[in-house]
Image (spheres, rainbow, N blue to C red):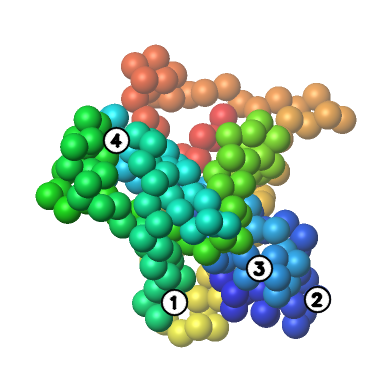
Amino acid sequence: MPGVHDRLKRRCLLPATHLVDGGYTSVALFDTAARNHRVSVVGPLPPSPAWRRQAPGFTREDFTIDFERRTVTCPNGKTSGNWLELPAMAPYTVVRFSPTHCNPCPVRTTCTSGKAPRTVNFLPRHLHELQARSRADQQDPTWRRLYASRSGVEGTVNEIVNGHQMRRCRYRGTAKAHVQHVLTAIAINIERLSTQEPTDTTYRPRPPTAFQQYLDARELPRPRWWRQAQ
């Protein structure tokens, strides 16, 4: 993704907002795009995982992180100052709770299943706060309406891949493959135009054939190559 932004910058085509799918989202990407290119990357961040899939299970958001005092407080009210930054391995801070906190804890089974005390990992402060804001924004209806525009992109990709078999190239060589892509795109545009209702003529699409009505009545899928010709 940073390489994409670099190429767009050289062509003076950088967008103010870049909508991406979940495969490209990370807090580091959000931060780098904003700092280096002033691009607001919008995409879903996965939720913080609990130590087990079945609820209940405490996630990192259930712990209170005090960056000023360099302490972390667990959901049961115990505070640990065992603060360890690991810049050599990854930009993460690790805070470990002591056995005196975890062993007698009445909610230990909700927090950890191991014999060792609970460990909490989190990003540096500016990335941690950016991550929290991004996850909160995802619950906002305004964010969802903005991100919903990506459905048009995903729908187009799905149409090209599944409706026109574009994962398979019919010719060898980059030049011939490019021609195939261009001709396929033209065919898709013509097909979309042909399905629009005319506004200045009395033309109406032809009714379904008897066989099409038979399939529709029994909720059977039509062959893909028919392309919904009606």
Residue 120 showing in the rendered view: yes
As drawn, the label of residue 198 is none
Q: Is residue 117 left or right of residue 38?
A: left
The extreme left residue here reads: 115
Identify the residue shown where x is 33% and y is 38%: 58
Question: Identity of the amino acid at label 1?
Answer: Pro
Between 226 and 3, the residue placed more toward the observer is 3
Q: Quadrant of the C terminus?
A: top right
- Classify mark 2: helix, strand or loop: loop
Number of callouts: 4
SS for dot 1: loop
- The residues bearing labels 4 and 3 have C-alpha atoms spaced at a distance of 33 Å
Horizontal side of residue 184 vs 170, given as left or right: right
- Identify the secondary structure beneath mark 3: helix
Question: Quarter-wise, where is residue 13 in the image?
Answer: bottom right
Residue assigned mark 4: 57
Disc 3: which residue: 33
- Lower sequence index among marks 4 and 3: 3
Which label's residue is closer to the chain start, 4 or 2? 2
Mark closest to the chain's N terminus, 3 or 2: 2
Sequence order check: which comes first, mark 4 or mark 1?
4
> Where residue 117 appears, x then y in whole percent?
22, 51
Q: Give the residue type at disc 2.
A: Cys
Going by the numbered disc 4, the residue's amino acid type is Gly
Q: Which of the two discs, 2 and 1, sits closer to the camera? A: 1
